[in-house]
Image: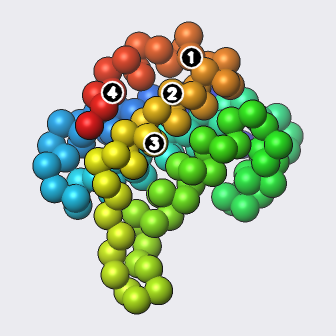
Amino acid sequence: MAGRDKHLQKARRNIEFLCEILGVAQSKRKLDWCAIAAFYAAVHIVDACLDPEHHPTSHGDRNKLIGREDFWIEYSSMYSLSKKSRYLDDDAVLLYPSVESVAEAIHDLREITRKTRLATELSGDLSQVPVP
């Protein structure tokens, strides 16, 4: 299983990608990828804090492990937005997030980073993320 440093490295790559696509997010098609990239940065930030011996193997496992953490509200909001952005709704309609929901996801990402006490390590990366 990947260690803390590998998860932080992957979080940084997701944040870097988020910055790149926010720069060109003129259409809703790009905003879905913004939501997804922000969520997967959060996944790796959370995973960096988890005990490697009890590392989750799925989103469901991770959700059970962190369901009582003080960042759960932000994480679950990002998880929900990411799922809506990745999949079709019941009527086979693509769901694109709004600019406001992507801005909220970026705020949630910063909060998760702060609450997991990784803000110092990721502050340089997060400071580059523009809010749409």
Indicate which disc, 2 or 1, sits on the residue closer to the N terminus.
2
From the image, tell me which residue sits under label 1. 119
In which quarter of the view is residue 131 placed?
A: top left
Residue at x-position 46% and y-position 32% = 107
The amino acid pointed to by label 1 is Ala
- Whether label 2 touches label 1, CB < 8 Å: yes
Residue 4 or 95: which is nearer the viewer?
95
CA gap between label 3 and label 1 equals 16 Å
Amino acid type of disc 3? Answer: Ala
Q: Position of residue 80 (x, y in %)?
A: 55, 59
Figure quadrant of residue 47? top right
Q: Which structural element holds mark 1?
A: helix
Q: Is residue 128 left or right of residue 69?
A: left
Which element carries disc 4, helix, strand or loop? loop
Identify the residue under disc 4.
Answer: 129
How far is disc 1 from disc 4 in space, using C-alphas?
A: 14 Å
Amino acid type assigned to the residue bearing label 4 in the image: Val
Indicate the amino acid at tag 2.
Arg
Q: Quadrant of the N terminus?
A: top right
Q: Nearer the viewer, mark 3 or mark 4?
A: 3
- Label 4 neighbour load within 10 Å: few <14, some 14-19, many 20+: some
The reply to whether callout 1 and callout 4 are in contact (CB within 8 Å) is: no
Q: Which mark is residue 105?
A: 3
